[in-house]
Amino acid sequence: MNDPDRRASARTLAVVGGGVIGLTCALAAADAGHRVRVYDAGHHGRAAWVAAGMLGSLGEGHPGEDALLELSTASARRWPDLVARLGDPAVMAATDSLFVAMSSADAHHLGGLAEFVWARQPRAHNDLRAVDHAEIRRLEPAVTSRVHSGYLATGEGAVDNRRLLDRLQHAVRHAGAEIVERRVADLADLPEDEVLVAAGLGSRALVSEVALHAAKGEVLRLRRTNWSVPPPTRVVRARLHGRAVYLVPRADGIVVGATQYEPYSVTSTAPEVGGVLDLLADATELMPGLRTYELAEAGAGLRPCSPDGLPVIRRIDERVVVATGHGRNGILLAPYTADRVMALLDGHEEPMLDVGMTNEGVRR
Ligand SMILES: Cc1cc2nc3c(=O)[nH]c(=O)nc-3n(C[C@H](O)[C@H](O)[C@H](O)COP(=O)(O)OP(=O)(O)OC[C@H]3O[C@@H](n4cnc5c(N)ncnc54)[C@H](O)[C@@H]3O)c2cc1C
């Protein structure tokens, strides 16, 4: 993994961007013997810092996004190895997700999504199953008694995104790579043999071939008090008033997410009043006991989105590879991206999905 002979002979790699994508790729490259330096402009504006950390593959399966479901499922399977590599099981904040419908119309909608996932991922029959009102109440007593029915996605969990970033930084350094705080303005200024641009939205300014737009989203962090009911043990996801809301457990409370405004041309990452109000209203309706939690943080971030919703992971020229455009799923897709980037650095251009379907037009 960290063989000095191999490292001495290896080519040097600059990774531009120290978010979840840049760090996961940097770790894979350092483990493979590359001499890696990560250039990062800092924590401000990093989407992975704001994010909720859901590893939502089945729950992110929407008709028309077949290729994304394939990539998501492929990446979800790689997560246990990444957590083992980081050596910290507490990076995982939850291991299952519960999708709840508040009405029969919602239940019908959720049922359609489940049918889509089952059709595309036959193996998902083992991992995604219908649950009725009584089972939801038994599984998660803190969820409102007004729930109608739902689906339990076993194995579809969440990570503590901030702990993950911390552990990734630690592992990258421990693997022999360097992390320097610097905003890169021009790739030509970098002395390394090869460059990976993984700067999220910042990739636009460095690689003109890549089209990206921002999708702004607000997230709340709620802290449990001594007199609060415990948070759910699973990720709980619902639609209320036509809006998606989810509760993601943390050791000290719950992350509530997330709004989405797309396309978004403003670069401000200040949370907006309307977004915070909607999240609070929906979250407390879904779990009434949240009213006694403390509002520890209201944050907002900009998801780096590609025009077709798929990540852009490809070679730009002989020296430069890019990995960006992960939209709402960048944390989930990090291990898959790292494998794909390593294949590109090793000279393999062919697609490498490890799931059974062809995905013409998928930029992998
Ligand atoms: C509200 C919200 C909720 C989300 N929830 C989830 C979720 O539950 N699950 C999930 O999988 N994903 C989620 N996401 C999406 C996820 O956060 C992103 O897809 C992911 O963070 C993208 O990773 P990245 O490394 O490409 O970009 P970022 O995390 O944005 O990191 C980019 C890094 O590059 C650096 N940088 C930029 N320009 C330069 C430069 N010129 N030179 C040097 N460094 C530079 C920045 O400082 C930053 O550190 C969410 C996002 C938001 C906003």
Image (cartoon, rainbow, N blue to C red):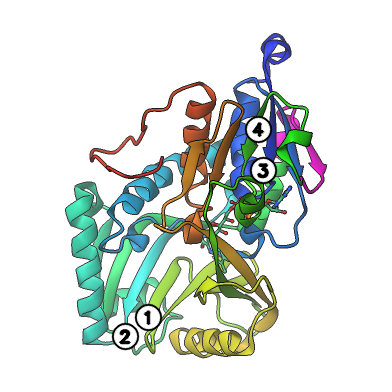
Magenta span: 171-184
User: Along the horizontal axis of the image, is 197 left or right of 306?
Assistant: right
* Residue, disc 4: 195
Label 3 or label 4, whichever lies nearer to me, is 4
Q: Which mark is residue 102?
A: 2
User: Along the horizontal axis of the image, is 268 left or right of 107?
Assistant: right
Residue depicted at x 48% and y 66%: 233
> Mark 3 or mark 4: which comes first in sequence?
3
Q: Circles 2 and 1: CB distance less than 8 Å? A: yes
Residue depicted at x 82% and y 46%: 181
- Mark 3–mark 1 distance (CA, rounded to whole Å): 33 Å
Quick one: quadrant of the C terminus?
A: top left
Residue nearest the viewer, comparing 344 with 29: 344
Q: Is residue 336 visible?
A: yes
- Residue 213 falls within the magenta-colored stretch: no
- Mark 2–mark 1 distance (CA, rounded to whole Å): 8 Å
Is the C-beta of the residue carrying label 3 under 8 Å from the nearest atom of ligand 1?
Answer: no
Q: Amino acid at mark 3?
A: Leu
User: Along the horizontal axis of the image, is 273 left or right of 150?
Assistant: right
Examine the image and state in which quarter residue 51 appears.
bottom right
Q: Which secondary structure lies at badge 2?
A: loop
